[in-house]
Image: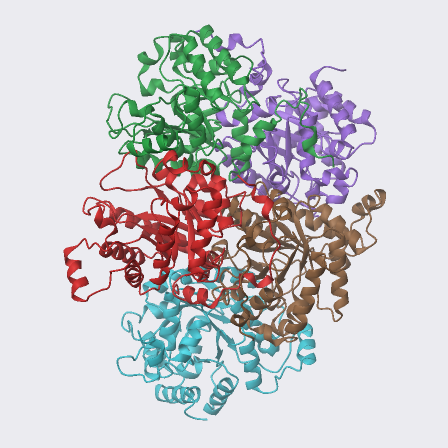
Chain colours: A purple, B green, C red, D brown, E cyan
Amino acid sequence: MASPTTTRESHSESSAHRSSDRVREILSWYSSDNPGTKGNLARMLNHGTLAGTGKMVILPVDQGFEHGPARSFAPNPAGYDPRYHFDLALEAGCNAYAAPLGFIEAGAAEFAGEIPLILKLNNHDVLHDEKDPLSAVTGSVGAALRLGCAAIGFTIYPGSSMASKMYEQIRSLAEEAKRAGLAVVVWSYPRGSAISKAGETAIDVVAYAAQIAAQLGAHVLKVKLPSDHIEQEEARKSYEKYAIPIGTLADRVRHVVQSSFDGRRIVIFSGGAKKDNDEDVLNEARAIRDGGGFGSIIGRNSFQRKRPEALKLLRRIMAIYAGDTP
Amino acid sequence: MASPTTTRESHSESSAHRSSDRVREILSWYSSDNPGTKGNLARMLNHGTLAGTGKMVILPVDQGFEHGPARSFAPNPAGYDPRYHFDLALEAGCNAYAAPLGFIEAGAAEFAGEIPLILKLNNHDVLHDEKDPLSAVTGSVGAALRLGCAAIGFTIYPGSSMASKMYEQIRSLAEEAKRAGLAVVVWSYPRGSAISKAGETAIDVVAYAAQIAAQLGAHVLKVKLPSDHIEQEEARKSYEKYAIPIGTLADRVRHVVQSSFDGRRIVIFSGGAKKDNDEDVLNEARAIRDGGGFGSIIGRNSFQRKRPEALKLLRRIMAIYAGDTP
Amino acid sequence: MASPTTTRESHSESSAHRSSDRVREILSWYSSDNPGTKGNLARMLNHGTLAGTGKMVILPVDQGFEHGPARSFAPNPAGYDPRYHFDLALEAGCNAYAAPLGFIEAGAAEFAGEIPLILKLNNHDVLHDEKDPLSAVTGSVGAALRLGCAAIGFTIYPGSSMASKMYEQIRSLAEEAKRAGLAVVVWSYPRGSAISKAGETAIDVVAYAAQIAAQLGAHVLKVKLPSDHIEQEEARKSYEKYAIPIGTLADRVRHVVQSSFDGRRIVIFSGGAKKDNDEDVLNEARAIRDGGGFGSIIGRNSFQRKRPEALKLLRRIMAIYAGDTP
Amino acid sequence: MASPTTTRESHSESSAHRSSDRVREILSWYSSDNPGTKGNLARMLNHGTLAGTGKMVILPVDQGFEHGPARSFAPNPAGYDPRYHFDLALEAGCNAYAAPLGFIEAGAAEFAGEIPLILKLNNHDVLHDEKDPLSAVTGSVGAALRLGCAAIGFTIYPGSSMASKMYEQIRSLAEEAKRAGLAVVVWSYPRGSAISKAGETAIDVVAYAAQIAAQLGAHVLKVKLPSDHIEQEEARKSYEKYAIPIGTLADRVRHVVQSSFDGRRIVIFSGGAKKDNDEDVLNEARAIRDGGGFGSIIGRNSFQRKRPEALKLLRRIMAIYAGDTP
Amino acid sequence: MASPTTTRESHSESSAHRSSDRVREILSWYSSDNPGTKGNLARMLNHGTLAGTGKMVILPVDQGFEHGPARSFAPNPAGYDPRYHFDLALEAGCNAYAAPLGFIEAGAAEFAGEIPLILKLNNHDVLHDEKDPLSAVTGSVGAALRLGCAAIGFTIYPGSSMASKMYEQIRSLAEEAKRAGLAVVVWSYPRGSAISKAGETAIDVVAYAAQIAAQLGAHVLKVKLPSDHIEQEEARKSYEKYAIPIGTLADRVRHVVQSSFDGRRIVIFSGGAKKDNDEDVLNEARAIRDGGGFGSIIGRNSFQRKRPEALKLLRRIMAIYAGDTP
């Protein structure tokens, strides 16, 4: 027979869901996963403005739980309503929307099948904020299936004295998720008594955090943008001896991507706290793009802006990733 | 906040996955189901050429198991390759592709996330063909999840002395599928020692078969196109006393739709054996459309034609359902 | 259908849910049951027009499955829509509404908490009608909980060669239902190769059927109205030797009530096929009342009439049970 | 105690159980839940004096366990008898009654089906009172079903170092409860070594506590009435920058409601310790009403008053919520 | 039929097992329990010298485990033999005999069916005596059934930092026991780092301990005789404000009974350490009787006396409870 892959080039309207060659390449990296998991990765990669580009912009809204409602939503009170975020993610053309159980339950039926969902399975509040934090497991794989999610999300804190417990939790949850055909997204945020504040975003630590998440079997890794600080003395020797370029943000992104199985795991970067100047956000996106990163997970810089500004910013970010603007 | 429902009308490129009002209306009929199941129904309703119209054309290929390979694929040998059918369904813009375990396993990874899949969980061969048939359960809900399917499919044979066993099998499988957020598609094909050959497509029997599938909790019902024959004497009294219109095919489709919870369950119609004349197939589609049916499940009339002819025919059928042609 | 949201009246005093002395007396008969089951019996006894009287009128609609859609709904096509029956039961002031899985799923969310529901867990169609029938188990206790039902319903056919299998099924299902706090309603319909057609409603057989259902642990028994025929020769000797009065319908109802643990189980009577003359239905209700029966389960004589006629008839029946009319 | 059987009034019209438009609107917020859970929410919303208004007054009596018997019941010794509280809740027209296992077991059969019950699944005593408390899980979903409850209740202490454990317990119990069609009520009471005494009712902390309970998937949230104190410095910046109105109690209630998914979760407020002056209690109810709160959970201010005074006060509170008095 | 409750007063020989009105009244308090559990409560209430009076004297022998053999049995070495205690309980006319697994296994067959047995499911030794003790679970519901026991026994230590764990253990064991038709006896002994030595028998603490056991779902509560000490300052305010009489031992017993669901749970009192003077023991029994207590659990004061003295003392105690002596 004629190979079915030879007729893919002309994307007619009806074949809008065909994966692009780039998406197929990305999926090929996950060759140990079953078609269900691959399909859910494809659902995310094929959704929204960046569909087919292999790039991703995800809207995450867990700050209500992690920071409290006023800190999260007072800047743009429309965000108190859980449905606002489903709608924002859809309208902005995000690849997926990630949130804890309550927020997903509050909109999953109304927006059924409209946008890939990531159920964040663990959460931590700051009413009791430990030096060595351990998030509570507040969701389950069963809930992710019941709510129609494409993936589970899970946060690990490498550097916390509780890290091993989190690694074991995600081992078990990821195993269950993969069996059920879900994808696994891991937020890897170094934090804890053994790490300095600067160390949390140090290039050696962030690259290490990405490696750990990848080794734990995550399909999609989310890390913070790294600084040029180096936290660990043993690591510093290597960075210096081998002159690993970490001078620019793009350099550092490139190193983190390299540390994520030489770019064979999807690694995306967190936008961090809300920035008043859009250009700062856009420049970060340019550095991620130039460093070969796969995209951004942008929470506060989207939902804490008024809707028109958020849509405008997200679209400019996506244009950068899509290669439509410099 | 601005109501998220107010901005649905203008479908921008990025919001291609927004459900239309018609799809939202259809989903509202399944109010006992969880968002996962609603989402998978939406995935099927929002895929392909008929996305958003509330109509469906599904490609089913279980004839290899049910009738044997030569009878099934010799007319168009490309169909021996399982990948052919995924590609055909995609290229034709079908809403979903349905097949037994082996065929799905043979292509699910390659086409991951590209087209909604229905794993047919039971199958029957004709090497031992009973008067009162009972299909074997050859798949599972776990397999459907592992393979990334949107729905399970199941065949019942009302009229078979084994019907009760099949009803109990689908009860249990549907319960498991619904819990896991999958949709349930039931092929309801009257057959067995208590029914004449003509009775298998008699209007009273087909309407009854649709009712049974709906009462068993199916989300999507598939029945054969009914003739104007009436099989059961007790039923004939009702058809005559209440002058139920069954004169035209559209009349009979309308009655089957009414028998499917007054049109509140998606009921689609089987194309049956391959017809040499395309117009016969198209006229059936017109009758289904005119009678308020939700679409067709077209196997032999698509995959037994050469690819270009099949694509042409499927596109003409979809144009009829879409209202683009008379 | 008239929208159910248009007729919401103002709410009455706060103590409307107190059980009457009669309801408390009835509940005392079920002293082996847990408070959950007692509560669900109370929910049925305290709902609708007959709330608190200890009498019940239940609307059952399983004929779509049992007899086919046209025979069931053509007389009043509004009944093709599953929501029609929820609304009819509510508007008529019935104590509960009973139906198979599909019909319950199609309305349980929309009418959540408005009327006690009975999920009929087994069903039988007439496309294959055996001399010794065995219904298929088409629902589960889990589904009853998920759908918010007050009770499970189950049909047994004493006299069928398959009766033992049904007795064992209800044993297991009732055990599970009682543990979960649900009530158990058993339809006991003698039928099978060992019983003549006349025997199916013979007084000895109906009384026996009631006794069997009670011995199986049913909380509510449903039997057909008995004729004065006596089917079993051994039984005839007793009826004659002890001169058991069976001359009038009220006499026979009294004997069936006596056979239902001396009236310590709720036994209600089936209305049977649709009657053209309302008075025939009303006279049956009078006989049931006079014989000490607990009420009626009225399907075809309600949903096969046009809505206004059905409401009128059901209200007249309830007035008879309430003692408001002779 | 006065016998509960002496005050049975005549029953109102048959459609008393229809949900009002407001109740239907509230139920629509829980679109991820099954009809069983929706039905149990409806049972609570449709019960008692406030039936149909969307407002709730719940009687909780867990102080025997939480504070000890004399502190709880000496002010009104009738309350030592568990039946007293069922009767009080019924007579006052409360929407539901909440208590630990022992109290529910001691009356659930006698009051079967008369008032929606909430089984409090965890409890804590003050014989060993930790700085960072963890309640013991003293009930189960199985017990809630067996006892005929409409909901499970669970207390979390955000701010306790044990909070994560409680979040994980309610995750698992809520999942089981929702599957069985029960509703989930969460008491969210900030407390622990990281929070000052004033901080326990600080507006930022109470709003945060409501958000956490909602994100954990609770259907009904119960929090304490907030003061205008702000506990967390990071939060203070948001309250000041965005000038969130917290000057009056109604303002603060409004902010807590907003923090409960923009008012799309039922949030009710705790009355706290017994107040000698009824007007203080009534003014709180007015502020809750004016701020858009859904009602009160009033324990000590009801059962620690003599029955006539308690009934009078509860009725005046309900009149405020019903809008019958200013 | 003649009501079975009218012929109870004269206990004929054949009706020796008929429950008295008092026993029936007591059983009515356990209305959430199944007939199995009610039956086992009845077996204890209807056994021995106090049968039918509603009073109980139980022989417990767990000191071998709790205190060591010499401390327990050297005063009366016959007690080293497990059979001695079965025989003593029988001969003295006790209602039941309670012991750990080994003691029960050593006599259950020999005395099969002769005396109600209570299997103590947890035990604690003093070879490692913690400030905050946690007993080990040394038996199971399965063992209780296998050994023919009427009840399980379980010790909680309110006030221990481990109390929550014990509450969760008894929650789970009680649930299992009740399902199997066993009764649940809870020893509630305040103890731990948060309670002073005097506090262990303080009236407020003992009343609280009884309340906790009742809220945990115990059928029979066993507490220590309370002193007039008040341990908790918050509690003291209530005792003083409401002038709760605690001056005499009978007063205090009365308050504990009140704290046990207003006397609707069987609460019995522990004799404590062996007293040399019989009159001290008898005076305690008189106070228990006068305060409305349900009886005594007398271990060391029976089995550490020589058999004749023990029998004599136990009979005198029973005569007090029976009202035969002042």
Examine the rendered structure and indicate whether residue E244 appears above or below residue B47. Answer: below
Q: Nearer the viewer, residue E160 or B142?
A: B142
Residue E295 quadrant: bottom left
The N terminus of chain B sits in image quarter: top right
Q: Position of residue C9 (x, y in %)?
A: 60, 52
Q: Nearer the viewer, residue E219 or E209?
A: E219
Q: Position of residue E123 (x, y in %)?
A: 45, 67
Q: Nearer the viewer, residue A28 or E177?
A: E177
E231 vs B29, left or right, is right
Residue D276 quadrant: bottom right
Examine the rendered structure and indicate whether residue B33 appears above or below residue C287. Answer: above
- From this viewpoint, is residue B99 visible? yes
A144 vs D226, left or right, is left
Q: Residue at x 64, y 34 (%)?
A: A98
E208 vs B176, left or right, is right
Q: Position of residue B232 (x, y in %)?
A: 29, 31
Residue E44 quadrant: bottom left
